[in-house]
Amino acid sequence: MSSFQSAPQAYDRFRSFLENACGILLGDNKEYLVKSRLKGLMAEHQFADLNRLVDQLESRGGVALREQVVDAMTTNETLWFRDLHPFRILEEKIFPELEAEVRSRPLNIWSAACSTGQEPYSISMIAEEYRKKNLGKLSRGVSLTATDISPSVLAKAKQGSYEMLALGRGMSKERLDLYFTADESGSWQIKPEISKAVDFKSLNLLQNFTGLAGQFDLVFCRNVLIYFSQELKHDILKRIHGKLRPGGYLFLGASESMTGMNEYFEMVQCHPGIIYKAK
Ligand SMILES: C[S@@+](CC[C@H](N)C(=O)[O-])C[C@H]1O[C@@H](n2cnc3c(N)ncnc32)[C@H](O)[C@@H]1O
């Protein structure tokens, strides 16, 4: 698209905007990604080039546009029971280990960067299955707070309605029959017994966490810190530590690791999988 040809400084200005707005750090060679993800938005608002878009983003009135751009630039890729081992670790280690702790209250879990809801709903399903298999255990259930910066994925997550294409990514036939009802449009609606445990909220990990009440027993922060600088990742991990009760656990994505945080977290090998215990 010729109108999208951007001068090098326009791309640099856009990169700074994006990192300041949501933490996402774009490399030198990611101009093609910006072009493809913003194509529709540029046409819709009739911006002549990237500089005009950044001018508008930096202006006072650009709040709605900033939200739209962040929404378009985030990668929302997710699936049901992603990586499998975190869910096995919940069943085999965490639920039994925290049993005494949660006898008179729900297990409090935060899914930070929940995308379209597959992660918190998968956790809710595993908890439900554990309760059925172990009568009297985890009796108060789980209370899940699920957050994301992107308004469009949060709306989809709250709706709890999925097409076969999305369900084909990790949802078994048995669980589909158990936890969803088919609707007339060919989509599948998640049942209230699973969705009632999840409270979705908008939250930018760059901002403070004061909107999240209390402390959590578990935090899932998976496949989002990979987009951020090392410095920002450390800052967020320290603040997540502040929201975990001592002895609570943090789950990162399968390809993610943590360095330089020994003061805050102890690494726990689970064979397979690694989780991080808050000191
Ligand atoms: C790749 S998805 C990961 C979803 C899920 N945790 C998983 O592992 O399947 C990354 C999510 O992080 C969200 N995200 C990106 N930057 C964020 C920020 N600064 N604050 C909160 N969420 C953010 C995106 O909107 C996206 O939904």
Image: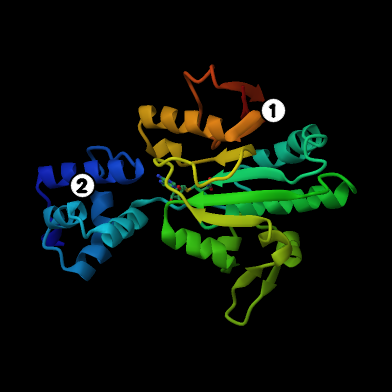
Q: Position of residue 279 (x, y in %)?
A: 61, 22
Using residue 29 as the reference point, say whether residue 255 is left or right of it: right
Q: Quadrant of the N terminus?
A: bottom left
Camera-near label (2 vs 1) is 2
Residue 135 locus on image (x, y percent): 90, 49
**Can residue 251 be seen in the rendering of this structure?**
no
Q: Nearer the viewer, residue 36 or 241?
A: 241
Cβ of disc 2 within 8 Å of ligand 1? no
Q: Describe the element under mark 1 as helix, strand or loop.
A: loop
Q: Are marks 2 and 1 in contact (CB under 8 Å)?
A: no
- The 10 Å Cα crowd at callout 1, few under 14, some 14 to 19, many 20 or more, is few
Q: Residue at x 20, y 68 (%)?
A: 45
Taking the image as shown, residue 131 lies to the left or right of residue 267, namely right
Name the residue located 86 percent from the left edge and 44 percent from the top edge. 137
> 124 or 202: nearer the eye?
202
- x, y (%) of residue 7? 9, 47
* Label at residue 271: 1
* Render colour scheme: rainbow
Q: Is residue 81 left or right of residue 259?
A: right
Q: Residues within 10 Å of mark 2 (few under 14, many from 20)?
A: many
Q: Amino acid at mark 1?
A: His
Label 1 C-beta lies within 8 Å of the nearest ligand 1 atom: no
Mark 2 lies on a secondary structure that is: helix
Q: Is residue 227 above or below residue 2?
A: above
Q: As displayed, is residue 178 above or below residue 13?
A: below
Please name the residue shown 39% across and 40% down the image: 206
Badge 2 or badge 1: first in the primary sequence: 2
Question: Which quarter of the figure has residue 47?
Answer: bottom left
Q: Is residue 188 visible?
A: yes
> Identity of the amino acid at label 2?
Phe
Report the residue marked by disc 2: 14
Estimate the x, y position of residue 233 in percent, counting from the top left: 42, 31
